[in-house]
Image (tube, rainbow, N blue to C red):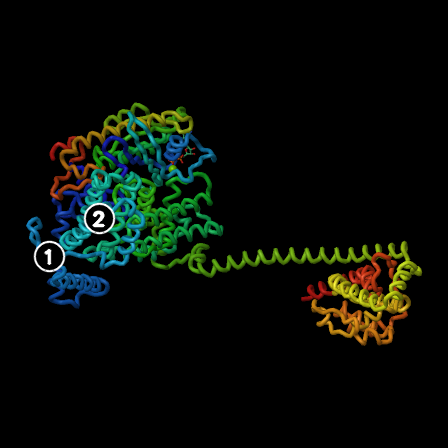
Amino acid sequence: MANNTSGASHNFKVVLLGEGCVGKTSLVLRYVEDKFNTNHVTTVQASFLNKKLNIDGKRINLAIWDTAGQEKFHALGPIYYRSSNGAVLVYDITDEDSFQKVKSWVKELRKMLGADICLVIAGNKTDLEKNRNVSLEEAEAYAIKVGAIHFQTSAKLNKGVEEMFLVLTQKMLETVEEKEAQNAPLSRQNSQRRNVVVVDDDQVPPPPTRQCCSNS
Amino acid sequence: MPIFALQRSYKYMMYATKQPSLRINQADLKCKNGCGYYGNADWDGYCSKCYRNHMDQERQRKARQSHSDQTKVSGFSKFEEKKRQQTDKKNKYLKSLPVFRKTSSAKDSGRPERHLDLRQANPDADKLTAEFISLYGVWGEQVRRDFFKCVQSFTTKIYSELENKPIEDIAEMAQKYYNLYSNRVNNTETYQEVTTDVRDELLDFFEKYVMVSLYSWLFCPPSTNDEEKDLIIQERIRKLSWVNAHHLDCCISETSIEVRDLVYTAITHLLGMDSMKAPQDKLSCVVSCCQSVVKVLQHCQGGPVSADEFLPALIFIVLKANPARLKSNILYVTRFCNDSRLMQGEAGYYFTNLCCAVSFIENLTAESLNMPQQEFEAYMNGEITSVSAWESALVACEGMHQLCEHLSLLKDLSIRTNTVQDETKKLTDDILKFKEEMNEKVNSVLERTPLIIKPRKTPELSEKVDDTQNSQNFYLQNLQIATSNIDDAKTKLQLDITPCVSKTSPTDDHSLSKINYDIDFSDLSGESSLAELTPEKRKSPSFTPDPFSPVGSSCPITQAPLIPTKPDDFVLPFVETQETLLEKEDEGPNLPSPIKPMTAQYSGFSKQGWQIPSIPCITGELGANASQANSQTSQDKEN
Ligand SMILES: Nc1nc2c(ncn2[C@@H]2O[C@H](COP(=O)(O)OP(=O)(O)O)[C@@H](O)[C@H]2O)c(=O)[nH]1
Ligand SMILES: [Mg+2]
């Protein structure tokens, strides 16, 4: 309800996806609490955290959803990421498998949510550069290919974390504002509902690409 | 635009996964009919259009079937079928009633619209109406009227569409209406004066009101197979009752009482969901449950709880709780809870996790428990049964719980008993020590100050003068003093002496009486007159001794009346039993009165005399008391 389209405030949902132990929880704790691996973290739980931002005078509330990274829970992904505005796909630069996992997430997300969701790929643990197993060039090239932004982060040294979330937020803001601009003349009554929009059942199902909005 | 159509279908895609491979592939997403649209698990894998066609066909087929042979339908499906038929019948009946028939206006699509006064039909709505007035009455009549107008129009609209549209469309209508009302509250003049916070509250209240009013139609509606889904998941959870925390790789400690209590709390909250009516209330139950789960995990591992630990723990709780009508509740909340609340915020996150847990349970395989297929099947068939601490705890839940409580109670009691015993021992020791000390002290005092009775001169003189001058007057005076003294002495002596074993007091009596005998006869006349009175009479304050009493004036003065009088007066409880014995021991060691009478204090010796020997009397009393206490405590111990 606070989801006011007048530009005053926005609620964004961001999911953290990636293999177990790549540092998802560490990243979000670093971002929200600025703590790493300590017992002095004040949050009771790190699975759901809010962060308030102000970008160009727009109040933004980021709801960051941690997801269970175990392989057996992979299938639950769609439930977690439905109606999210952004996703942070984390891999461990010392672990090639975790990067492959990111690729499979990207594929799934693009298939399910199209361009609606802003993607960020984060190569975490850059402080372990000497053990790197995923080439930076390869990762960046891949990110460009799928329309994601690539970042190198270290939750341990607090490198690139703040920047990553900021850029993601800006991108989500752009996407939402773009969508609102297109949406407004079409269905005014629905402009308040961000993601679940009522349309006629006879609508053509969308191709998972960006130009989808032009045909209606 | 079409993105939204896709997204919308994702909203209902929560359970779109298939067994045993949980991966979603393109084929799974398409409509089963092959029309190219996206399908949905809740629509049996059809897209919405095909699903509707399919359902229509089904309905017709079933109608035909039920007409031709009803016997074919068996078991639960038969029951379901009956239920549906009954509702159909009921609706037809309702429609035929004139009250529910309303001629359709030109705007309506021509079919009769049923009008329903829900407030009349629902006591919960009545309660909410009262609540509304008490909470938001201050914002004025206009707000109230508009609120109820919107509620009425919402409920009527939904109710009229109930039969014609699938529940998902009704849900869309409800969501649309929430937004309409939200716009109305935020943009119209009626609500201008209402503060932003209260506006949000009003929106929540609106949702609550309409949903409570329509609950019986919208929760687990007969047009859906929600109830069958409930039974399926319930049966599945029952079959999975052997799954323990270890299988799920979650670190819930099975032995800690605190953890167990928190687990019970979480389970209770989850079970409470079914008894709530408004979607937001159901959601709060989920939130409370999940918060308890977080506490459990904090207890077991410390540090912030991440999703990796949270989800398995929640799955464990759902498995152990096996909540009633789980799917119906989840679907109801998904459909009718305001999306903006469901999609974000803590409540949204926890609800999503609950959906995840349910989905995981539905699709659970041997692989997801890291267990060989054969073992898994053996468990599922009941060939292996495992009894873990949790199982026994939860099966014998109540008994165990009480046992634990009783044990802690007993522990507490035994601690307290021990302290009492220790204290008692200390007290006994103190008493003994005190007794010895006292004895020593008394002895030393006695040694230092032996009683020497010196012949008194001055008081005797003055008395004598008085006596001779005016015997009548003296008599009166003496008596008056004596009475006041009685009262004083009585209170004092009773306080001091009452519990005393009168080993010493009769001796005092003796010495005193001797003194009395020796010294002052006139005094005794007063005393003896008093002795005639019953103790009751003497206690009454109005009593004044008769100065002209024949007893007082004529009675020959002897020691005889003194002895029964005094003990009777002041040491009632002991004298009677011990007097005779003590009288025999008269010639035994007498405690000489250590205090010599003084002029100022003098007034009728006999009474005064009672005050004086109270000191040696106390020593005796204490000794006796101590021994008595000793015997008592020893008795206590024996008990
Ligand atoms: N060296 C290093 N270790 C990290 C970094 N981020 C996380 N870790 C470690 O990686 C492990 C897994 O982190 P966690 O946040 O639990 O990963 P998650 O399973 O993806 O949530 C922990 O032991 C962290 O200390 C990092 O930037 N550098
Ligand atoms: Mg984690």
- Helix, strand or loop at label 1? It is loop
Is label 2 within 8 A of ligand 2 (CB to nearest ligand atom)? no
Mark 1 = which residue? B102
Q: Is residue A112 visible?
A: no
**Which residue: 31% across, 54% down?**
B276
Q: Are marks 2 and 1 on the same chain?
A: yes
Q: Point out residue B221 in the picture as x, y percentages from the top left corner.
A: 21, 56
Q: Amino acid at mark 2?
A: Arg
In the drawing, what numbered circle is on residue A157? Answer: none
Is B80 located above or below residue B22 in the figure? below
**Which residue: 25% across, 29% down?**
A173
Q: Chain of mark 2?
A: B
Is A216 located above or below residue B562 in the figure? above
In front here: B74 or B10?
A: B10
Count all numbered tags in the image, as a single digit. 2
Do the residues bearing badges 2 and 1 touch, measured as CB atoms within 8 Å? no
Q: Tell me which image quadrant ligand 1 sits in.
A: top left
In the drawing, what numbered circle is on residue B145? Answer: 2
Q: Is residue A207 toward the left or the right of residue B348 in the image? A: left
**Which residue: 77% across, 58% down?**
B432
Is A126 located above or below residue B276 in the figure? above
Q: Is residue B428 toward the left or the right of residue B156 in the image? A: right
| Between discs 2 and 1, the one toward the N terminus | 1
Q: Chain of mark 1?
A: B
Q: Point out residue B172 in the picture as x, y percentages from the top left corner.
A: 19, 46
